[in-house]
Image (cartoon, helix red, strand yellow):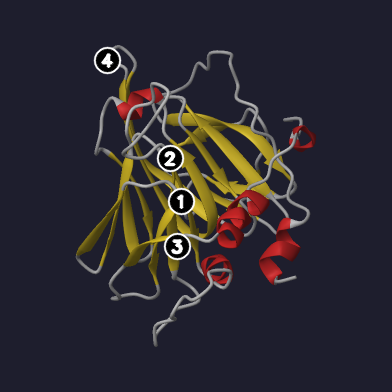
Amino acid sequence: MNRLLLRAAGVLSSLSLLTAPVTVSSQTVGVNAAIRNNVKVKADSTAVETNAFVKQKVALKNEVRTAINSTLQVLLLDRSSLTVGPNARFTVDKFVYDPNKKASAVGASFAKGTFRFLSGKSTRANPGQTSLRTPISSIGIRGTMVEGSVGQDALEIMQQQPGFTWPERVDPLTATLVVLRGPGRNARNGEKPGLIDVTANGQTVTVYTPGQAVFIPAPGAAPIGPFQLSVGAYSMFDVVLRTTPTSFLAGP
């Protein structure tokens, strides 16, 4: 079993979404909905790191870090959700929400680890304004769910991709894998079509089909894809981001 699966074996968190209204300051962007094990948060790069807890307010520019076998789910005020797996680091660095117009835009940066972002209805009403960033790419999201990995996680997932031809240069710290979970261009059952735009080294790849992925191996490299992610590689996102009700932690 590779290292990613070993780390993921103990990952348990909850997909429970908080339904009570949250009264917050102008800088607050959401609330911690579920935590498993050791999650740390800093108000900014100069602040003291503290333990995160469920129902804790998440503010713009908070720096969040998960430890081994640890996960976090954040429910944003616009009902978008963000889940990160073990050994991840991320920051929510943009959040614009107009509840009267039911429109919002979200921006987040991921330094390492595996993540999932699910668009809320208000982000779908403001297409093209929500984006995620990794050290070597940007991901424009138009009303859908996207999953990604940065660093060693990305490489271990790609090792499950049969027939993949590895480029000569791969950076284990910044290599990025992005996959469209859906809905895609051919959405069904009343869902609105969605897509993602993955940009690296000045080149953009648009992904319309759920299950298709883009891989960026290193800084300055062009994106590879889109290609259909194998069942083995695709399932590793579920393993790493798996959630269960036992993850709830009491706040102070």
- Element on which disc 4 rests: loop
Cα–Cα span, label 1 and label 2: 8 Å
- The first of marks 3 and 2 along the sequence is 3
Kindly report the distance in space between the C-alpha atoms of the residues bearing marks 4 and 2: 25 Å
- Circle 4 residue: 101
Mark 2 residue type: Gly
Q: Which residue is mark 1?
A: 211
Are the residues flagged by discs 3 and 4 in contact, CB closer than 8 Å?
A: no
Direction from residue 169 to residue 24 in the image, left or right: right
Q: Separation of disc 3 and disc 2 at Cα?
A: 16 Å
Query: Residue 109: x, y in percent?
Result: 41, 52
The residue located at (39%, 88%) in the rendering is 168
Query: Disc 3 to disc 1, how far (Cα)?
Result: 12 Å
Q: Secondary structure at mark 2?
A: strand
Q: Which tag, 4 or 2, sits closer to the chain's start?
A: 4
Residue 210 x/y as whole percent: 42, 46
* Circle number at residue 182: 2
Depth order, front residue of 212/65: 212
User: Within 10 angstroms of label 1, few (less than 14), some, or many (20 or more) residues?
Assistant: many
Residue plotted at (65% across, 41% down): 52
Image height check: is 47 above or below 166?
A: above
Asked whether disc 4 touches disc 1, contact meaning CB atoms under 8 Å apart, the reply is no
